[in-house]
């Protein structure tokens, strides 16, 4: 884990951030949007993507799998890797040179939960028309854990940025207070005689 954290620390800069931001934005804007449209077209109705649903609802997941059964599905392999690197770079830039520098590994936990969710989705799809409530529940658990970690990542980014802003504000105020101020020399009493 230390090696991965150190690797992210080495590659984390504005250039890599912009590259991964472009990749990250392209997935929901193009790839996932097109995948959802294809799923809906092949299913003949609006189904959506299991990975993007919120909450804990095994019945909804099983219904979506039944609707997917008529389609050819591929799972998202690249997107979790892209968002893991993107958020790891953001966290590294926010928490670099702090005691919390290893927090940059948290996005990879979300990625692992996402892959575990995908394994369960594949299992449900391959076993269709049989439906396993256990596998659907595991799918929901991993999805819930993924979103929980995402929430923590967002909170950590916001908290880290706020702390940096407050620290910069405090540093600027401290520099101003240390700056020598001009005070006119004391008047010599003999000048007025």
Image (cartoon, rainbow, N blue to C red):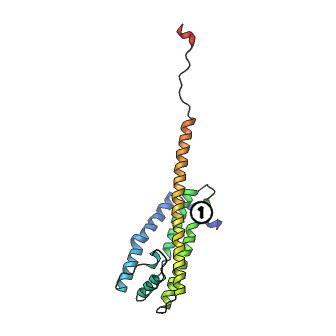
- Residue extending furthest toward the right: 2
- Residue extending furthest toward the bottom: 129
How many callouts does the rendering have?
A: 1
Q: Vertical placement of 175 versus 166: above or below? A: above
Asked whether residue 72 is in view, the answer is: no
Q: Residue at x 36, y 79 (%)?
A: 37
Circle 1 sits in a helix, a strand or a loop, which is it?
A: helix
Instruction: Find residue 147 and report its horizontal and vertical position in percent.
Output: 51, 71
Q: Residue at x 42, y 75 (%)?
A: 32
Instruction: Find residue 97 and report its horizontal and vertical position in percent.
Output: 61, 55
50 on left or right of 115: left
Q: Nearer the viewer, residue 177 or 108?
A: 177
Q: Vertical placement of 158 versus 83: above or below? A: above
- Residue extending furthest toward the top: 193
Instruction: Find residue 176 and report its horizontal and vertical position in percent.
Output: 54, 37
Asked whether residue 145 is in view, the answer is: yes
Q: Nearer the viewer, residue 94 or 130?
A: 130
On the rendered image, what quadrant is the C terminus found in?
A: top right
Q: Residue at x 61, y 59 (%)?
A: 101
Q: Nearer the viewer, residue 18 or 96?
A: 96
Q: Which residue is mark 1?
A: 103
Q: Residues within 10 Å of mark 1 (few under 14, many from 20)?
A: some
Q: Residue at x 58, y 67 (%)?
A: 106
Q: Vertical placement of 61 versus 84: above or below? A: below
Instruction: Find residue 65 and report its horizontal and vertical position in percent.
Output: 45, 85
On the rendered image, what quadrant is the N terminus found in?
A: bottom right
79 on left or right of 48: right
């Amino acid at each position: 884990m230390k090696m991965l954290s150190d690797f992210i620390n080495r590659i984390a800069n504005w250039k890599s951030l912009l590259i991964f931001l472009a990749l990250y934005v392209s997935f929901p804007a193009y790839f996932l949007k097109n995948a959802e449209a294809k799923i809906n077209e092949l299913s003949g109705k609006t189904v959506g993507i299991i990975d993007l649903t919120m909450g804990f609802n095994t019945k909804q997941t099983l219904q979506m799998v039944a609707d997917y059964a008529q389609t050819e599905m591929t799972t998202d392999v690249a997107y979790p890797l892209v968002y893991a690197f993107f958020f790891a770079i953001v966290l590294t830039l926010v928490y670099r040179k702090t005691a919390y520098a290893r927090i940059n590994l948290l996005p990879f936990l979300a990625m692992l939960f996402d892959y575990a969710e995908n394994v369960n989705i594949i299992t449900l799809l391959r076993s269709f028309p049989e439906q396993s409530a256990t596998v659907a529940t595991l799918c929901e658990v991993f999805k819930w854990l993924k979103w929980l970690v995402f929430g923590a990542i967002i909170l950590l980014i916001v908290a880290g940025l706020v702390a940096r802003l407050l620290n910069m504000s405090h540093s600027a105020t401290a520099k101003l207070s240390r700056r020598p101020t001009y005070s006119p020399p004391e008047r010599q009493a003999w000048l007025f005689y």
